Image: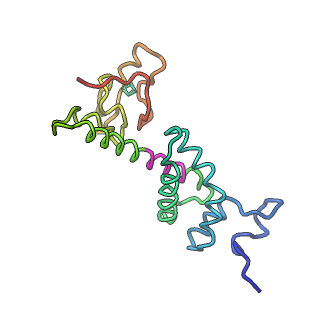
Amino acid sequence: MAPTPFRVIRGTATGKPNGEPTDAEIAESLRRGERQAELEAWNRFSPGAAQTLRRLLGPGPDREDLLQEVFLRFYKRIGTLREPAAVRGFLFGICVRVVQGELVGRHRRRWLRLTPTGEPPETAREVPNERTGLCASCQHSETVTSVRGSTFSLCRLSASDPRFPKYPPLPVLACDGYARQR
Ligand code: SF4
């Protein structure tokens, strides 16, 4: 008899009327290294991940490649997922990191493209920082250090414009108030 795909993760204790595995069950199967779970995970999570990439980056021809990159990292790092039920958040975090890398790469490519004379047209500070994003090169940003030595990115625009939080969630990937440092 031919083996049944996803035999291990389709249990009766899924709690779902149609017998489909839960997100956590798929994550657990992946963590156990069950190769067939990779396809199940792709079918279950790739539409949401693709939507996240579109939301963060807008439409573009390279989205499929980025989605593949997300899932390669997802499969590779699934062993570090502590709570299987949080698998969607885990995957979302990977999407964000892939997008950050893509944005940094784009700025670097633009930076290189715009140097016909070999002279850098922009300062290196324009390359978004992976931790803070655009705030790293924004003239409204101020780095503040707590008494414990932690550093925070403070947005000075917040003092005059309520649209901007004093301590924006980082990294800031898009911002209407961004103004390049001179
Ligand atoms: S205006 Fe935007 S990019 Fe500039 S510091 Fe504030 S949040 Fe960051």
In the depicted structure, whether residue 133 falls above or below residue 32: above
Where does ligand 1 appear, by image quarter?
top left
Q: Position of residue 107 (x, y in %)?
A: 33, 39
Spot occupied by residue 58 in the image (x, y as percentages of width and height): 52, 37
Where is residue 73 shown, x and y percent of the image? Answer: 47, 60
Which quadrant is home to the C terminus?
top left
- Toward the viewer: 77 or 176? 176
Left or right side of 16 for 53:
left
Q: Percent x, y for residue 54?
A: 55, 41
Give the residue at x 35% y 43%.
104
Name the residue rendered at 48%, 48% in the picture: 62
Q: Which residues are magenta?
A: 90-99
Q: Considering depth in this image, is 80 or 39 the residue closer to the camera?
A: 39
Residue at image point 40% right, 46% down: 102
In front: 129, or 69?
Answer: 69
Q: Residue at x 47, y 46 (%)?
A: 96
